[in-house]
Amino acid sequence: MTRQNNVLKQAYNAALAQLEHGAALPSEPELGQRLGVSRTTVRSILSRMSEEGLISWDKRQKTVLRAPKPADFFPEEETDSLTEVVERAFMRRLVEGSREPGMQINELELARAIGVGTSSVREFLIRFSRFGLIEKRPNSHWVLKGFTPSFALELAEIREMFELRSAQAFAALPKSDPIWHELDRIEADHHALRKVVDSEFKQFSALDERFHRLIHTASLNRFITDFYDVIAVVFHHHYQWNKAGERERNAVAIEEHLRYIGALHSGDAATVEAACRTHLASARKTMLESMS
Amino acid sequence: MTRQNNVLKQAYNAALAQLEHGAALPSEPELGQRLGVSRTTVRSILSRMSEEGLISWDKRQKTVLRAPKPADFFPEEETDSLTEVVERAFMRRLVEGSREPGMQINELELARAIGVGTSSVREFLIRFSRFGLIEKRPNSHWVLKGFTPSFALELAEIREMFELRSAQAFAALPKSDPIWHELDRIEADHHALRKVVDSEFKQFSALDERFHRLIHTASLNRFITDFYDVIAVVFHHHYQWNKAGERERNAVAIEEHLRYIGALHSGDAATVEAACRTHLASARKTMLESMS
DNA sequence: TTTTTGTCTTTTATCGTCAAAAAACATTTG
DNA sequence: CAAATGTTTTTTGACGATAAAAGACAAAAA
C-alpha cells in the first residue's frame, strides 16, 4: 500500500453531514474552503456522491437528490490519518503494556504491531522525542525514559514558569482585546459544566486544554505555545489511566479555574499569581500522585 | 545506495590516529569501547587494516606493522553522517540563499540539491521543526518562518527565563560538587583566550557553548537542557553570517563571562542575577542588531 | 570461569517507487 | 473579465527492499 485516502474519506463524511435535501451545493473552491481540502479532493467527493446517487452533478449544477443514510458514511476508523493511528497505538502500549524506564523500543516490531510501515513509526518517534519521554541512541535503538516522577516534576517546573508569565501577560491585555470574549465563553462553559459535573465530568479534559491554551496565547511566544503540546499529550494520557477520584478532581479544578478567571479579570498581578500558583500546584500534585 | 558506511570510515580514521608502531592492539570489545562503535565495526576496521598491511592480525595477536600514511585515511567528507550533511546544507541555504519568511520548502527539490533521498530530508525537517523556524502545513509543504526579529525576541525571552533559574540553581550547589571543577577549567580557558583574543577570537563560540551548557545542567531539567540545542544552533549560524565587529563582541563577552563566573562563585543570588542579566541582555542585543 | 574470538541474527538507515492530495495552468461560462 | 470548471503537473505520504551496523549466541582460549 501507499498513502491511504483518509483525507478524502474524512472530508466526504464531513460533506455528507452538511447535505440538505433539495439544496444546491456551492462552487468547488467554496466547498474546498469549507472542508479544508484542495479542489482535487472536492472533485473526488463530488464524483463519488454523484455515483452513489446522492447528488446530480453537471458543471455548476449540483443538486442534492436524497438525504445520506448511515451506510453512505465511511467507517470512522478509516478516516484517521496514519499519524493519529500510530500515536494512539503507541500511547496505548505505553499506558497498558510494558513501560519500564530504560526499555528499548524496536521500530520494526512497533510497525508490525500497529500494521504500518517503518517510516511512519520512525517519523512518529522523531516527532515524539521532543516530549522528553524517549531518547535515541545514534545508530541504535530508542530508549524509553518513562512517565517517572522526575519527568512529572521537570514538566511541572517549566509549565509553572511559562504559565505564570502568560497569565500576567494575559491580565495586562487591554479589555478591548477579543481574547476576553473567548475567556468569557470559556467561563460560561465552566459554569455550565459545574452544574452537571456529576455525570459529565469527562468533558472537563477538553475544556481544561482550551482554557490553558488560551492563556498561553497571550505570551505571544512560539516556544511557550508549542510547549503546551507536551503538556496536552501528557495530561491527555494521564487522564486515560488515572481514573481514581476523577470526578472530585475535576470538580475541584473547575472551582480553581473560575477563581483563576476572576483573577485575570481583576487585572491585579498579585491576585493572578496567587490563583495561578494554586491551580498549578494542585495539578502537579495529582499528576505526581498518579505516578507513584 | 542504501546506508553508507560512514561509521566505519570515521572509526577507522580515529583508530589510525591512535596506532603506534610496534605496539599491540587491545581486544575487540576494548577497541569498540574506545571508538564508540560495535564489535562488528571493530572487526571491519581490523580486516581493512590487515589488508592494507598496517597490522598483522591473528586472533589475539594484533601488532602494528607500520605507521599510517595520510593516504591511509578516508577523506573527511566521507566520514560525516547523512544527518550532518543535510543539516549543514540546509543551514547554508538558509544563510546564503533565499530565506524570505513565508517561503515554502520543497522536500524533493531539497533532497535533489543535497544529493540525498527524500526520507533523510523529511526526517531532518521534522527534527528541525522544534527549533521554531519552520512549520508544517499538514498534507502540504513546509513553511519557512525565518530568522526574524520576533524569532530572536521569543528565543531570548525563554533563554533568559531558563538561564536565570539555572544560574541560581548552580550558585546554590555545594562547593564539593564536581561541577565547580569544570567551571574552574572553563574560567581558566577564558583567561587563556583573553590573552590571545585578537587572533583567536573564533574559538570563543565553542567556549561560549561549553559555559552555558554547564550552567544549564544545574537545572536538572531535561526541557531546559534540551532547549539549549535550539540556542546553540541559532547562535552557531548567527556567528556564521554576522562577522561585523566579531572580535570586539567576543572580547566583551569574555569579560561578561568572567564576571558571571565570579558571581556564581560568590553564591549571592542578587549578584548572580545581575551578572546573568547583563550578559544575556548584551547577547540579545547583538543578535537583534544582526537581524535588522 | 571469565574473557576473547568466530558466527549468525536482528535492527537501523537510506533509497527508489507510486498513489493520494495539492497546486498550477488552461478553458469555459455567466 | 472574473469566477468556475476541466486538465495536467508537482509534491507529499507511505511502503518495501537492502546494505551497514548493532547485538546475540556459541566456541575457543587464557
Image (cartoon, coloured by chain):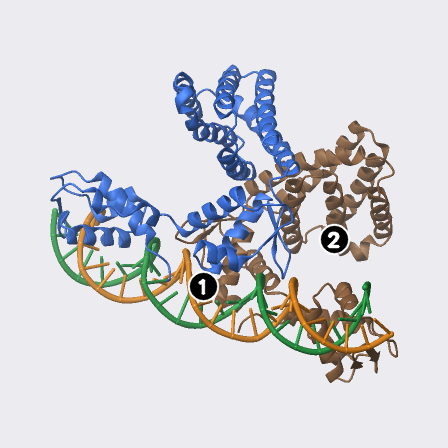
Chain colours: A brown, B blue, C orange, D green
| Residue A284 visible somewhere in the drawing | yes
Query: Can you give x and y, in whole percent of width and height, for residue A255 in the image?
Result: 81, 42
- Disc 2: which chain? A
Which residue is the site of mark 1?
A: A108
- Total numbered labels placed on residues in the image: 2
Q: Residue at x 84, y 42 (%)?
A: A180
- Amino acid at the residue labelled 1: Leu
Compared to residue A214, the image places residue B104 above or below, namely: below
Query: Can you give x and y, in whole percent of width and height, for residue B217 in the image?
Result: 49, 32
- Disc 1: which chain? A
Compared to residue A232, the image places residue B238 above or below, namely: above
Q: Which mark is residue A146?
A: none
> Gap in Å between the C-alphas at discs 1 and 2?
34 Å
Classify the position of the C terminus of chain A by image quarter. top right
Q: Residue at x 79, y 45 (%)?
A: A254
- Amino acid at the residue labelled 2: Ala
Which residue is the site of mark 2?
A: A206
Query: Can you give x and y, in whole percent of width and height, for residue B55 in the image?
Result: 14, 47
Q: Are marks 1 and 2 in contact (CB under 8 Å)?
A: no
Residue toward you, B172 or A10: A10
Compared to residue A91, the image places residue B210 above or below, namely: above
